[in-house]
């Protein structure tokens, strides 16, 4: 045998080992009929949607955290307006001199009014007889992460010039939101795992049922010298075809749902939600789901069949 | 226990078989089958012929005793090595056991495919074999559309096509007309002439006379009798050199 022929034989052998093609059609092949492809399609669709949700949430958190990581908010909580103004200016000057501070902005009064308008009305802070004292706000951007140590340094720097100053990390405000999102992420991961387990269970039952139906044929093939691996490959291929077909349908369904949901969320115009869009790596991961489902189905079928065959002589 | 000489193809020593907790259906079987011999296994219904054949084609392990086949201990042989041993045995089942979703052609091709033959190498031997059993025009027919006799011929073609070292046939002529029965026996004889050990279970006494050099193993209530010296160890040798190791009748 020439090296080329040898190579071809080895490649063909390897392909046969993986796909089962070339093996005799020992059991009737389902060819995408019956409930199995649809069960797999539903599983894949749900898995893709759950995974897409998990990835979008992760992107949201990463994006929001990146923007707020070095952010501080300094509030000058002083009821007397002149004193508040004076402390604000002093705080601005002091903050500007700190080497860790890379950005600084005194939030304009119009912006503050706009922020509190939904709660206090449009003229509470300006034209009423007894205007509500609104703290002055300073947005500070640090070069590094706004951790407790940095916050303490800023507090220490401000205590002499602006005793009414309160310093908070901006990310701290969103910590409960991050926690909630992290919980949702774990929920998405749990869903993906549960769906994978459900898929494996469905394949296991289908393989067992097919084994029962074809028990007589399997015994004949055994007696003719067929190996467990040959028989398992046939089931593996049959379920692989079902899983691949179901996977494509399921992925298409999930794609429609994700795109529709994406458009809906984009329409909300909410900053946090907008940051949850999927990147190409996310789409690649989602596209792997039907492949992973087919692989999982084939492995489950093989293990189930091999396990059952070992009980036969 | 008889000592293996290395020449025997099958050796049973004090073999017994029981199903579950019932009484033994086969008892104290000790015999040796030699390469190139032709054996008839006879006995009344329920004597244990099919059970003995199941032991011979490795569908069953005995409850006790020792079985050596093709030089291997068939009792302790690991499961994964059984297929290679089974490929050396052709089996004609009493109920044919054709694969219902496969055509006659594919049923006959099955042992070759299982052994790894490529599709391009199947056409000629399978077609020739089906022609030989008179089913060239029924190649694409599914078993359900074949008559009992036709199914039996497909089953025989499937058993002999891989040129097994041992052919085990359970009532192979039970569903065919006398003319076809003789023809099938001639096929078995031809195969036997090529060195295949043939074991045919039958209760048809007329069949025994059609193969004059054959040896008879008679089963009675699960025990073997030896009317033609088939079970002697070592057996008497044939003077006919064309049949290797064949005991004289």
Image (cartoon, coloured by chain):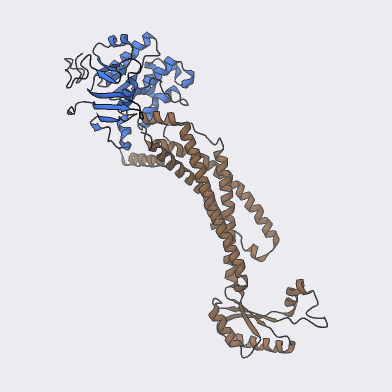
Chain colours: A brown, B blue
- Please determine whether, in this image, residue B156 is positioned above or below residue A173: above
Q: Position of residue A185 (x, y in %)?
A: 57, 60
Identify the residue at image location x=59%, y=56%.
A53
- Please determine whether, in this image, residue A58 is positioned above or below residue B32: below
Between residue A187 and residue A232, name the one nearer to us. A187
**Which quadrant of the figure has residue A178?**
bottom right
Q: Residue furthest bottom?
A: A160
The C terminus of chain B, quarter of image:
top left
Q: How many marks?
A: 0
Between residue B31 and residue A49, name the one nearer to us. B31
**Which quadrant of the figure has residue A169?**
bottom right
Q: Is residue A202 shown left or right of residue A2?
A: right
Q: Position of residue B235 (x, y in %)?
A: 18, 19
Residue B17 visible in the snapshot: yes
Q: Is residue B3 shown left or right of residue B156?
A: left
Identify the residue at image location x=46%, y=17%.
B146
Identify the residue at image location x=65%, y=56%.
A262
Residue B121 visible in the snapshot: no
Q: Position of residue A150 (x, y in %)?
A: 55, 81
- Please determine whether, in this image, residue A60 is positioned above or below residue A14: below
The N terminus of chain B, quarter of image:
top left
Identify the residue at image location x=28%, y=9%.
B209
Q: Position of residue A54 (x, y in %)?
A: 57, 58
Q: Is residue A313 shown left or right of residue A179?
A: left
């Amino acid at each position: 045998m020439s090296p080329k022929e040898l190579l071809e034989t080895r490649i063909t052998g390897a392909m046969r080992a993986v796909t089962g093609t070339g093996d005799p059609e020992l059991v009737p092949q389902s060819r995408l009929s019956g409930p199995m492809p649809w069960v797999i399609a539903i599983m894949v669709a749900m898995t893709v949607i759950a995974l897409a949700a998990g990835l979008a949430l992760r992107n949201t958190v990463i994006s929001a955290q990146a923007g707020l990581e070095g952010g501080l908010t300094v509030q000058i909580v002083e009821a007397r307006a002149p004193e508040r103004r004076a402390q604000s200016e002093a705080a601005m000057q002091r903050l500007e001199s700190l080497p860790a501070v890379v950005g600084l902005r005194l939030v304009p009064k119009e912006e503050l009014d706009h922020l509190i308008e939904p709660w206090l009305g449009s003229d509470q802070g300006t034209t009423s007889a007894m205007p509500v004292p609104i703290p002055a706000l300073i947005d500070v951007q640090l070069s590094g992460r706004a951790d407790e140590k940095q916050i303490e340094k800023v507090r220490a720097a401000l205590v002499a010039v602006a005793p009414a100053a309160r310093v908070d990390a901006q990310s701290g405000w969103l910590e409960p939101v991050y926690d909630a999102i992290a919980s949702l992420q774990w929920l998405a991961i749990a869903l993906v795992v549960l769906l994978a387990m459900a898929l494996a269970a469905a394949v296991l039952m289908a393989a067992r049922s097919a084994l029962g139906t074809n028990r007589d044929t399997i015994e004949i093939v055994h007696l003719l010298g067929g190996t467990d691996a040959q028989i398992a490959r046939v089931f593996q291929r049959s379920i692989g075809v079902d899983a691949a077909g179901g996977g494509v349908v399921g992925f298409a369904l999930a794609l429609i749902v994700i795109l529709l949901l994406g458009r809906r969320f984009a329409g909300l115009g909410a900053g946090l939600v907008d940051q949850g869009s999927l990147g190409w790596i996310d789409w690649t991961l989602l596209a792997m789901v039907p492949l992973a489902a087919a692989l999982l189905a084939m492995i489950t079928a093989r293990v189930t069949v091999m396990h059952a065959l070992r009980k036969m002589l | 226990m008889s000592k293996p000489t290395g020449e025997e193809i099958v050796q049973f020593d004090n073999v017994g078989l029981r199903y579950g907790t019932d009484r033994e259906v086969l008892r104290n079987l000790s015999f040796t089958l030699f390469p190139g011999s032709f054996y008839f296994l006879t006995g009344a219904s329920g004597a244990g012929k099919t059970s003995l054949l199941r032991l011979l084609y490795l569908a069953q392990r005995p409850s006790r005793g020792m079985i050596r086949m093709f030089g291997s201990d068939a009792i302790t042989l690991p499961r994964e090595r059984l297929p290679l041993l089974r490929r050396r045995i052709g089996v004609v089942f009493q109920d044919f056991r054709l694969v219902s979703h496969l055509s006659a052609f594919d049923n006959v091709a099955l042992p070759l495919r299982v052994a790894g033959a490529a599709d391009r190498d199947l056409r000629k031997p399978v077609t020739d074999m089906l022609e030989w059993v008179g089913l060239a025009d029924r190649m694409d027919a599914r078993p359900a559309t074949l008559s009992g006799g036709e199914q039996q011929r497909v089953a025989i073609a499937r058993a002999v096509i891989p040129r097994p070292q041992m052919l085990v046939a359970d009532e192979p002529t039970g569903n065919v007309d006398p003319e076809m029965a003789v023809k099938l026996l001639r096929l078995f004889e031809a195969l036997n002439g090529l060195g295949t050990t043939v074991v045919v279970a039958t209760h048809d006494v007329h069949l025994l006379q059609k193969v004059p050099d054959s040896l008879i193993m008679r089963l009675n209530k699960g025990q073997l009798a030896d009317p033609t010296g088939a079970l002697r160890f070592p057996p008497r040798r044939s003077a006919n050199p064309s049949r290797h190791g064949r005991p004289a009748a």
